Amino acid sequence: MKKISLIAAMSENRVIGRHNQLPWNMPADWQNFRRITAGKPFVMGRNSYLAPDKLLSTSRSIILSHSEIPDLCENCIRAENWETALSLLQHEPEIFILGGQSIFEQAMSFANYIYLTVVHGIFPGDAWFPEIDKLEWKLIKDRFYHRDSRNPYDYSFQEYIRAG
Ligand SMILES: NC(=O)c1ccc[n+]([C@@H]2O[C@H](COP(=O)([O-])OP(=O)(O)OC[C@H]3O[C@@H](n4cnc5c(N)ncnc54)[C@H](OP(=O)(O)O)[C@@H]3O)[C@@H](O)[C@H]2O)c1
C-alpha cells in the first residue's frame, strides 16, 4: 500500500482512552472520521476491537492479537503480527491504523501520514497517543473549530506527513 495513515483523537494532555472507551462524545469527530476513512480498510488492536464504541470498516478490519478472538464480526480478520496484517492489505492504496495506544506506538515508526483530532480539554485517562517527533513529521493542516450545541469542546483537525 502507498499510504499508511494513523487516525486518532486525543486531548491536550494526549489522552485517547479511559476504561477502554473514548473519554468524550464529539459527533463532529465521528463525521470527520467517517468521511476520511469511507470504504478503506482498518487495522486495530484487540482491546480497541473489544471496546463498546469500536469503529469497523465497511471494507475489512484487521484485528491484531496473539490469540483467537471468538465470534469475530463480519469483514473482520485476526492477524497474529504486523507482517500478516500488512500483507493482507498490500494491494490497498490506503489503510487506516485505528489504535489503541500500543498499536499507535508500534505503527508510528512505519506509518507515513497522521490524521489527528485534538480535543481542546484536559482529561483523565489510561491510554495516550505517542509524542509526534517534529523532526520526523511535518504539520500540513491545522483547522480549529469552536464548540457548539452538539460538540462540547473546541477541537482541531490536524494532518501530519512524514518529513523527508
Ligand atoms: N481516541 C482514539 O483515537 C482511540 C482510538 C482507538 C483506541 N482508543 C483507546 O485506546 C485504548 C486501547 O489501547 P490499548 O493499548 O490498551 O489496546 P490496543 O492497542 O487496542 O490493543 C492491544 C492488544 O492488541 C494486540 N497487539 C498489540 N500489538 C500486537 C502485535 N504486534 N501483534 C499481535 N497483536 C498485537 C494484543 O492483543 P492480545 O493480548 O490478544 O495478543 C494487545 O493486548 C482504549 O482506551 C481505547 O478507547 C482511542
Image (tube, rainbow, N blue to C red):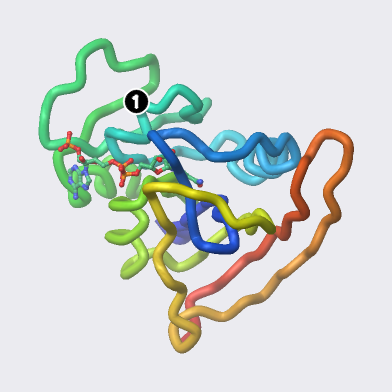
Q: Residues within 10 Å of mark 1 (few under 14, many from 20)?
A: few
Q: Residue at x 19, y 36 (%)?
A: 65
Depicted 3 relative to depicted 9: above or below: below
Q: Quadrant of ligand 1?
A: top left
Lateral position of residue 24 relative to residue 103, left or right: right
Vertical side of 35 occupied by 55: above or below:
above
Residue 157 picture quarter: bottom right
Residue 68 percent location from the top left of the image: 13, 23
Which residue is under mark 1?
50
* Residue occupying the far left of the picture: 67
Residue nearest the viewer, comparing 77 with 30: 30
Q: Position of residue 60 (x, y in %)?
A: 41, 30
The image shows a total of numbered marks equal to 1
Q: Element under label 1?
A: helix
Q: Residue at x 39, y 21 (%)?
A: 75
Q: Quadrant of the N terminus?
A: bottom left
**Front position in the image: 71 or 122:** 122
Residue found 83% across the figure and 48% down from its top: 147
| Location of residue 14 with respect to 66 vertically, above or below | below
Residue closer to the observer: 39 or 42: 42
Q: Residue at x 63, y 42 (%)?
A: 33
Q: Please name the amino acid that badge 1 sits on.
A: Leu
Extreme top residue here? 71
103 sits left or right of 69 in the view: right
Q: Is mark 1 within 8 Å of ligand 1?
A: no
